[in-house]
């Protein structure tokens, strides 16, 4: 008996009360590999759907060009109708594939994001009162509110990247078959453009790292103030806090 759609989703997403296994290591590569294995199901489905959707996007112009050529030469003949019906079928498959890629990519994002947040929560409960001496409360809040989503975003975008690589190869083959010079321009130019973009992004990444640390400091100020709010009011320190928070937020 086939499983219902809700059962499939339950298998792909973590249950709220399911125990979280410990990762094999705290090294970055090992953790990423562990997260990948945890989200292998939705990642595989999203990757396959992305390859299908992107490949259809790549070949659709070729079908359209063939239909136009045949229509201009021979009018509205059987070949044109065949190509048009084929395009209609491809667009239906593309719609299903693109929707599946978005849906299961979001499943991978949710699984990874929840895992990071649950790992942080478990570590906080294990460390207990010693946590404040090891790391600031703002740092912990930033891990749950910001870092977890960044890790989830990485896995969510793996599937579109796989589809983009495959569609790039399909387009390159089609272009080489039409014009060797044009195909070589695409084969050489696109990786070059991608490499240049990574160089442009690096300064942004450095600035984002600084911003992330600043956000952690702002969150620490906020949590410390909430914890000592009665004392602040008793000594009249609200203005001092407001000035500190305003300066940190502005920075």
Image: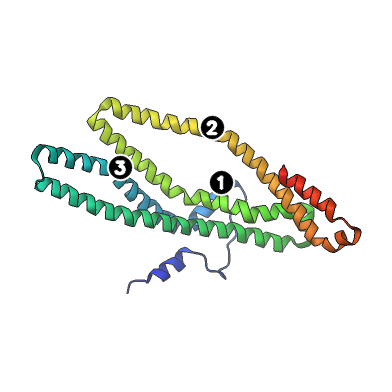
Whole-Å distance between the Cαs marked 3 and 1? 33 Å
**Mark 3 = which residue?**
58
Whole-Å distance between the Cαs marked 3 and 2? 27 Å
- Secondary element type, mark 2: helix
Image quadrant where residue 115 sits: bottom right
Task: Answer with mark 3 or mark 2, whichever residue precedes in sequence.
Answer: 3
Whole-Å distance between the Cαs marked 2 and 1? 25 Å
- Secondary element type, mark 1: helix
In this rendering, does residue 25 appear at all? no
**Mark 2 = which residue?**
200
Residue 222 x, y percent position in the rendering: 75, 55
For label 3, the crowd category at 10 Å Cα-Cα, with few meaning under 14, some 14 to 19 and many 20 or more, is: many
Taking the image as shown, residue 125 lies to the left or right of residue 202, namely: right
- Residue 29: which disc? 1
Q: Residue at x 58, y 64 (%)?
A: 20
Q: Quadrant of the C terminus?
A: top right
Q: Residue at x 90, y 62 (%)?
A: 234
Image quadrant where residue 67 sits: top left
């Amino acid at each position: 008996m086939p499983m219902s759609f809700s059962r499939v989703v339950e298998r792909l997403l973590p249950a709220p009360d399911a125990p979280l296994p410990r990762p094999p290591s705290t090294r970055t590569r090992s953790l990423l590999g562990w997260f990948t294995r945890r989200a292998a199901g939705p990642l595989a489905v999203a990757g396959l759907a992305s390859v299908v959707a992107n490949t259809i996007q790549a070949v659709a112009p070729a079908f359209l060009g063939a239909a136009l050529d045949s229509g201009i030469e021979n009018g509205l003949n059987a070949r044109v109708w065949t190509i048009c019906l084929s395009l209609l079928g491809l667009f239906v498959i593309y719609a299903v594939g693109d929707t599946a890629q978005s849906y299961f990519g979001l499943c991978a994002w949710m699984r990874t994001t929840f895992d990071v947040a649950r790992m942080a929560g478990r570590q906080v409960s294990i460390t207990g009162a010693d946590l404040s001496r090891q790391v600031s409360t703002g740092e912990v809040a930033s891990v749950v509110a910001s870092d977890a989503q960044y890790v989830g975003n990485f896995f969510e975008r793996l599937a579109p990247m796989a589809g983009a690589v495959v569609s790039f190869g399909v387009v390159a083959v089609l272009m080489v078959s039409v014009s060797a010079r044009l195909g070589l321009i695409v084969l050489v130019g696109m990786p070059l453009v991608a490499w240049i973009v990574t160089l442009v992004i690096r300064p942004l990444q450095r600035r984002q790292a600084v911003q992330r640390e600043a956000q952690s400091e702002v969150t620490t100020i906020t949590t410390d103030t909430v914890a000592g709010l009665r004392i602040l009011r008793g000594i009249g320190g609200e203005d001092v806090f407001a000035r500190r928070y305003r300066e940190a937020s502005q920075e």
